[in-house]
Each structure stands twice: as structure tokens, then as C-alpha cells.
Image: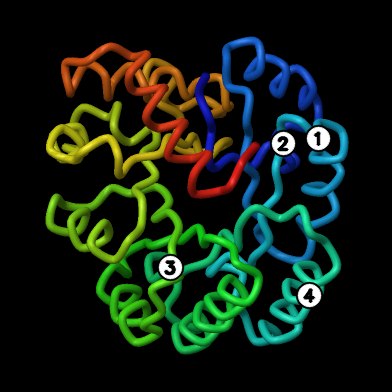
Amino acid sequence: MLIDTHTHLYVRDYNNDRDEVVNNAIDNGVNYLLLPNIDSKSIKPLKELCKEYPKNCFPMMGLHPTSVKANYKADLKTVQDELEAENNYIAVGEIGIDLYWDKTFFKEQEEALLFQFELAINHNLPVVIHSRESFPEIFKIIEKFNNPNLNGVFHCFSGTLEDAKHITDLGFKLGIGGVVTFKKAGLDQVVKDIDLKHIVLETDSPYLTPAPYRGKRNQSAYIKYIAEEIAIVKDIDINEVAKITSANAIDIFKLN
């Protein structure tokens, strides 16, 4: 069994074939699909998909850093209300800091991240962190927050071995996705030196499609190509990759 710990199958990219994509994942042994929220507009389709596939799709609740704008406090109140009203959220996510696209709301992103860390602690949930050109800033906030109960996943990890060690020392797992199959990215050589006990698998569908489908729309069934690449890099059986990474995900997200 494989687990896709980060997939956005509820977005409009799948409006014409969502059921087919979900069932294709399940048919390929990807039985658990973990769905991070983006913003207030994505909550309804996210919840509808989880309601349709309650044994396979599991929701997270959070405000994505690129959605942190001038009205971010109202959006955070929505996140807080959702977490208090529903008891089936498995994580606070997708949250973090993104300094790649726009640095205008950097201060607000920091405040939103700290607020959502508090929500995670209050609800005894892990966090799923989006970090783009922001490792130092996020490390600083986690260290400032200084709560040993804060844990979760650094989603879409593509940093250095030093970054990986810093993350695991902080008690977090590394979400490894399609980038590991990109030959010029170099992530495969970093993953080679990371113990599997620190890794969970993800697609980030519809983005970051792994080889051999790079450039096309991603889907959760393609997680097998990520597992295969890790197995090749580490010279182990793919079943070992599936077994350990799935156990890690089940432990972090408290999946039954």
C-alpha cells in the first residue's frame, strides 16, 4: 500500500474526471489520499470529495501562504472555525512561507504561520509546511515557537542534505515528490543519504508530475514512480519503500 500524503484532487483540474482519477489511485494501491486545504474557497470542494470517499480521502485545514493577503485574519478565523466545528481533520495544512512569488505579505505570512502552529497544538494535530525559498525563516519561527509537540511534514522537500538534517532534528518528516525523478534536480542524491524513517511520499497533484509523465497533469496513481525512484536510488525493494513510508504517514497523521 502506498499513501499520497499531499494531493489536491478537489481542484478544478479534475472537474471532468475526478472519480476516474481517485479510483485509478485506489486501483493502483494508493488507498489513502491526504488533501491539504488552500484557502476559504477550496473548503467546500475539499469536504465534498472527502464525503464521497470517506475511506480514502482525508482532509486537512489551513491557509496556504500564497493565499495570505490583506484579509488574512478573516481567512484564519475561517480555518479556526472549521477546526473547532469538525473533528475529522487530520492536520493543519497547507501552511508555511512562500517568498518565491511575492514578498509583499511576508510579515503576514509569518503571523499566519505562528497562529496556525497554535491551532495545531490546541487540536493535537500535525502541520504540513509549504516552504519555498524560506527554510531559514521557517526554521527561525519553529525555534521561536519552541514547542516539542509541534510536528508534521515539510511538504515538497527539495533542499540540501543539511536542510534535511535540520528538519529531521526539529522532529519533522520530509515529503518527497516528483522532483526526485527529475534527473537534473539532484534530489535523488540527497534522498540517497536520508533514512527512510524520515520520509513520506506525496504527489502534490496536479503539480510536479514525476517522470515519465513530467509536463502533464499529475495524479495520485503516479506516486508509484516516486517510490520506484527512491527504491532505485537506495538499492532496495519498492515494497520496503512502500512499507516504511506508509507506516510513517499512518503514524504522523494518526490514520486508521
Instruction: Please state which of the two labelled residues, at mark 2 or mark 3, is closer to the viewer.
Output: 2
Residue at mark 2: 57
Q: Earlier in the sequence, mark 1 or mark 4?
A: 1
Q: Earlier in the sequence, mark 1 or mark 3?
A: 1
Give the quadrant of residue 7: top right
Q: Is residue 161 left or right of residue 124?
A: left
Residue 205 pos. (x, y %): 56, 36
In three-dimensional space, the C-alpha distance between marks 2 and 3, rounded to whole angstroms, equals 26 Å
Amino acid residing under circle 4:
Thr
Residue at mark 3: 98
Quick one: label 3, few (<14), some, or many (20+) residues within 10 Å?
many
Instruction: Please state which of the two labelled residues, at mark 1 or mark 4, is closer to the viewer.
Output: 1
In three-dimensional space, the C-alpha distance between marks 3 and 4, rounded to whole angstroms, equals 21 Å
Instruction: Please state which of the two labelled residues, at mark 1 or mark 3, is closer to the viewer.
Output: 1
Quick one: label 1, few (<14), some, or many (20+) residues within 10 Å?
few
Residue 94 pos. (x, y %): 56, 59
Quick one: label 4, few (<14), some, or many (20+) residues within 10 Å?
some
Residue 212 is labelled as: none
**Which element carries disc 1, helix, strand or loop?**
loop
Q: Earlier in the sequence, mark 2 or mark 3?
A: 2
In three-dimensional space, the C-alpha distance between marks 1 and 2, rounded to whole angstroms, equals 6 Å
Residue 78 is labelled as: 4
Residue at mark 1: 54
Amino acid residing under circle 3:
Asp
Q: Are marks 1 and 2 in contact (CB under 8 Å)?
A: yes
Instruction: Please state which of the two labelled residues, at mark 3 or mark 4, is closer to the viewer.
Output: 4
Amino acid residing under circle 2:
Cys
**Which element carries disc 2, helix, strand or loop?**
strand
Residue 193 pos. (x, y %): 12, 38
In three-dimensional space, the C-alpha distance between marks 1 and 3, rounded to whole angstroms, equals 31 Å
Q: Are marks 3 and 4 in contact (CB under 8 Å)?
A: no
